[in-house]
Amino acid sequence: MNLPPANDVTSDATSESAGRAPAWCPWPGEDLAPGSLSVWLCRDAEPDAAAAIAECRDCLSDEELARMARFRFPALRRQFAIAHGLVRHVLSLFHPQVAPRDWRFDTGAQGKPEVAAGLPRIGFNLSHAEGLVALAVAHDETGVFSGDPVGVDVEQAARNIGPGIARRYFAPEEVADLEALPEPEQRDRFFALWSLKESYIKATGFGLSLPLDSFSFAFGTPDSVSFRHHPDRLPAGFGTDGFTPLFWQTMLSSPAGERHSLALCAGAGNCPDDNGIAVFEAVPGRAVRRLAPIWDRCPVAV
């Protein structure tokens, strides 16, 4: 197998910091040691990712194949196959006794996908935007998954932002902080907030039924992010599950000039220290490499 070229997937803060890109290894890699919380990235439009589409498609369920077929554009069908193939291949890294094609999925109480009963318990969450797929996995190495939530979101940071979107969807505190920034910095802050908020509502499983102004993020220092609930902004009778969320966020760039905001939300119960969150770039079933720490912002207590 020809391994992919070493095109960097790096954060703006750490790009080229090591002087050379990490080496690719044939799937499933050597000594990956993903740990209890990991993130898996795939540049789905790269030629090597496209070359993996057949083996990704071959492990999808009939229901997934039907969903894929409903997409009108070939690029969306390709991304769907690669994204869902990535989920299946990565879960099988943690539980090799289950072949990628044998994973089955159910919908949880809040509509969030989860591994079906009877299969090894492992938490995961999938996100994709134009050009990039991101998968977060929460796994207890004892084989007994705690059930702590995990959510990941990736946003294409070059797309247009309509006027008034921040005021419509963000908390007042976030809007004030955003609008106080110099104009050149506002785009990155907007997509940092958007991805962080998406990662939280995906981790909880509530989705957009959770008002986006009922929680907010603050950036006290350039490398930190803090989180606040605003219960007075929740509808009457609406309650969250009460888990303690922690957040990580970064702006990813590529040699081709693509930029994406990536955010991770996980329950405090399944989080190692910041350097313990393993981040991998992968071509599902073909190649993988571990990246250097990528996070621009890490959690702080409030």
Image (cartoon, rainbow, N blue to C red):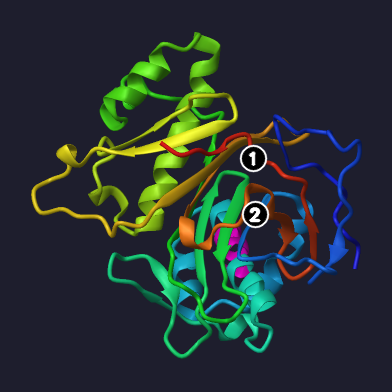
Mark 1 vs 2: CB contact within 8 A: yes
**Bounds of the magenta span?**
78-85
Residue 283 shown left or right of residue 302 in the figure: right
Q: Most prominent secondary structure in the magenta stretch?
A: helix
Give percent across and percent down for residue 8: 80, 42
* Residue at 67% in and 65% down: 35
Mark 1 or mark 2: whose residue is earlier in sequence: 2
Residue 126, compared with residue 168, is above or below; it is: below
User: Which residue occupies the extreme front position in the image?
Assistant: 301
Residue 184 shown left or right of residue 52 in the figure: left
Q: 88 or 179: nearer the eye?
A: 179
Q: 39 or 57: nearer the eye?
A: 39
Residue occupied by mark 2: 277
- Point out the image quarter for the N terminus: bottom right
* Residue at 15% in and 53% down: 238
Give percent across and percent down for residue 165: 33, 26
Q: Amino acid at mark 1?
A: Trp
Residue occupied by mark 1: 295
Element under label 1? loop
The reply to whether the magenta stretch includes residue 82 is yes
Give percent across and percent down for residue 99: 65, 85
The reply to whether the magenta stretch includes residue 96 is no
Q: Amino acid at mark 2?
A: Ile
User: Which residue occupies the extreme left position in the image?
Assistant: 236
